[in-house]
Structure formats: C-alpha cells, structure tokens
C-alpha cells in the first residue's frame, strides 16, 4: 500500500510511522521545509495525569506505551519516564488532590498523594513552600524541538519513506490523489490530511462546518537550571483546566479560592518540564477568541516566574526564549480527535488540542486500524 500523509507535525508523523511499521510506502508532504507549528512549541509532555476517563484515558495510556517503545528505538526523541508532581498549599487544593487519588482509575494513572518531604525526595529541586503534592508516575516527556527530525531520520532509514518539504497541498482530487502547489499530483491507496491548526483554505473547502477551533498559548524557556528537575511540575491551577480533576472538591476550589487576576484573565496554569540541555520550558496561557493577538503579553510571564520561583525556592534562570503557538481543538472537548473521511480514499485527522503530543501515537494507530493498513 502507498499512503500519502499531508502535514509533518507530530500527528502526521505518527501516521507515517504506523504506515511504515506495517510495511507500507509513505510519502509525507509538508508546506514548510520542516514542521514549525504546535508540535515544536509545546512542553513535550506525555501527560496522562489530567486526562478525562474513558476513551481519552485509554488513548493516553496506550500512547504512553507507544512513546516508550518508539523512544527506545529512536533515542533522539529524548523519551524520559519522569512522572509529574503538582504541589498544593491550601486545604481546598489538597482536597482536589485527595479526590483524584480516590478515583477508580487512579492506579492506572499512577496517582499518589505525597507529603512535601516525600515530594522533595522525588524532586530535590522543589525547595519552596508547599504542604503536599499529587504524584503521577505515568507521566513522561520527550524533546519537542528535535523529535520530528529524529522520527524523520528513522523513517528515512526504512527505505519506504519519502519526505517532501516546502510543498502545500492545494487540491484533493479523490481516489487517493492530491495536487500540491508545484502542480505535482501524488497518488496513493490512502491520503491522511493532518493539518494541525491550519484550518483555512483547503480544509475549509473540504469541511466548511468543521467542529474544531484554534487555541493560542504563550510559553517561555530558560537558561539551564544548574541542577536536575527530575519530574514535570504543575500547579493547582492545572486542576481547574484538566478534566480528570472534576469533583465536588474542585467545585469548592473554584468557589472558594480565586486565581490571581492575571491567571484568570489569561486562563493560566503552570506546566514546567526540563529540557535535556537543563533549561526549563514553562507555560501556559489559553486564548480562544479570534482574531488572536499578534504580540506576546508580559504579565503572564511575570506570573509564571513568581509561581516557579515559589516552588523552587530560588530565582529562575534567565529567560532566553518566549513564544506563542496555536493548536487545533475539537469544539466538543470531550472528543479526543476529529477523524473524518472527506473524499474517496481521503481522511482528515485534526483537533486533538492540548492532548496532541501525548496521544498522537495512539490516534495514528487507531486511524491505521480503522483504515485496515
């Protein structure tokens, strides 16, 4: 079988990976010379802890297995089974963590409530003030910036993979064929469109009422910390954002403990991961209203700096990068992804939202299974 994959973000690349793994020939087409969207601008977190139950958790757990297996074969991914800690300070925050540990699916997530001293033994860099922490053993991380190149090199080594960068697909011809902006037609037994957040143009023509929205976020990266940050770190505002923490305790937190004005205005949470060079990737904000701002705003960065320094108990290293990114999210946020046949032999896969990096291997595996690859 010959498979045409349009889009070289992590979702598209994982579709290429599964097709090659099953013995098929793959042509992957990317409008940029290399992927430059959300797949490179995220934390690299394989984030099981916050996922909703049911299909979303099953997808995340399966993806976690796949990431570890792929990481063993592709060292450039930088896969690390580091887990995560969410420190808590108030009784209301602690109650949300306790409710999470009481969930029936808590063992699958690797949830455990630990004391502040236990948390510091797990992650000695957390020298700041907090009373306890939610530990999630199943969380992991990869290196988002080099991951796509590492996967591409592994795919090229198979001898069944062709990468065409700097080409934008303009037309879907049906019957497994697309035409790019060079005028070349690419024909296969199946076409999978993975456009990421590029939802205008061709995608709008194919599905005018696509139930997917775009979300913008801001992030930053520091100089090396100078010591290991042995886990990912979140703050209690992440409880408000991730569906796994829905409970009466969360309702009480929302009613009884406000976010700071900056965090509330920018729909913020802290997520933090250390990169292999020692720097910290820190975020994030959420912006849903279009048109998005073209500039980044300093207040969220100042808020994140204060939160991180309060957990570390030390000044943050110099910030060396700030950026914004946009990802695509199903408007029904309970859906893992939007997968739709849009023409004969042509499927559209988009809208995983903030779960894209986590769930992409399992999303692509399901596509491959459904299409009978």
Image (spheres, rainbow, N blue to C red):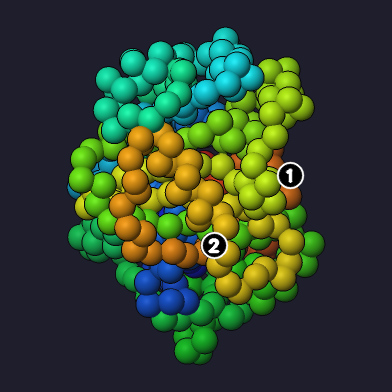
At horizontal 42% and vertical 26% (from top left) the residue drawn is: 129
- x, y percent for residue 268: 60, 46
Quarter of the image for residue 238 reads top right
Q: Which mark sits nearer the N-terminus, 2 or 1?
A: 2
* Side of 66 where 168 appears, left or right: right
Secondary structure at numbered mark 2 = helix
At horizontal 56% and vertical 13% (from top left) the residue drawn is: 98
Q: Is residue 39 visible?
A: no
* Side of 19 where 359 appears, left or right: right
* Side of 107 where 267 appears, left or right: right
Residue 106 versus residue 158 in the image, above or below = above
For the residue pair 235 and 340, the one nearer the viewer reads as 235
Badge 1: residue crowd in 10 Å (few <14, some 14–19, many ≥20): few
Secondary structure at numbered mark 1 = loop
Residue 57 versus residue 275 in the image, above or below = above
Q: Nearer the viewer, mark 2 or mark 1?
A: 2
- x, y percent for residue 111: 46, 18
| Disc 2 target residue | 298
Q: Which residue, as the protein is rendered here, is positioned at the far bottom?
A: 183
For the residue pair 340 and 244, the one nearer the viewer reads as 244
Q: Number of callouts in the render?
A: 2
| Disc 1 target residue | 332
């Amino acid at each position: 079988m010959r498979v045409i994959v349009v889009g070289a973000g992590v979702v598209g690349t994982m579709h290429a990976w599964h097709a090659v793994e099953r013995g098929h020939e793959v042509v992957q087409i990317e409008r940029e010379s290399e992927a430059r969207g959300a797949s490179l601008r995220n934390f690299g977190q394989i984030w099981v802890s916050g996922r909703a139950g049911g299909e979303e958790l099953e997808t995340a757990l399966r993806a976690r297995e796949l990431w570890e297996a792929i990481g063993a074969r592709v060292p450039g991914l930088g896969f690390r089974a580091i887990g995560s800690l969410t420190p808590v300070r108030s009784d209301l925050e602690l109650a949300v963590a306790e409710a999470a540990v009481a969930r029936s699916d808590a063992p699958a997530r690797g949830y455990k409530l630990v004391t502040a001293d236990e948390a510091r033994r797990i992650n000695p860099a957390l020298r700041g003030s907090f009373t306890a922490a939610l530990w999630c053993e199943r969380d992991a991380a990869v290196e988002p910036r080099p991951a796509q190149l590492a996967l591409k090199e592994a795919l090229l080594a198979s001898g069944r993979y062709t990468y065409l960068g700097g080409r934008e697909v303009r037309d879907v011809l049906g019957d497994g064929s697309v035409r790019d902006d060079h005028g070349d037609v690419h024909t296969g037994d199946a076409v999978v469109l993975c456009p990421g957040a590029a939802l205008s143009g061709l995608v709008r023509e194919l599905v005018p009422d696509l139930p997917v929205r775009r979300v913008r976020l801001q992030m930053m990266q520091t100089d090396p910390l100078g010591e290991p940050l042995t886990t990912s770190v979140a703050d209690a505002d992440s409880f408000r954002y991730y569906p796994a923490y829905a409970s009466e305790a969360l309702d009480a937190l929302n009613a009884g403990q406000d976010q700071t004005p900056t965090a509330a205005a920018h729909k913020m949470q802290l997520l933090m991961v250390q990169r292999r060079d020692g720097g910290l990737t820190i975020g994030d904000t959420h912006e849903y209203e279009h048109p998005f701002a073209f500039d980044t705003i300093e207040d969220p960065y100042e808020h994140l700096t204060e939160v991180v320094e309060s957990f570390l108990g030390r000044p943050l290293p110099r910030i060396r990068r700030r950026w914004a990114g946009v990802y695509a999210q199903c408007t029904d946020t309970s859906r893992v992804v939007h997968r739709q046949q849009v023409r004969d032999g042509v499927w559209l896969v988009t809208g995983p939202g903030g779960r894209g990096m986590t769930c992409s291997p399992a999303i692509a595996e399901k596509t491959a299974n459904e299409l009978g690859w």
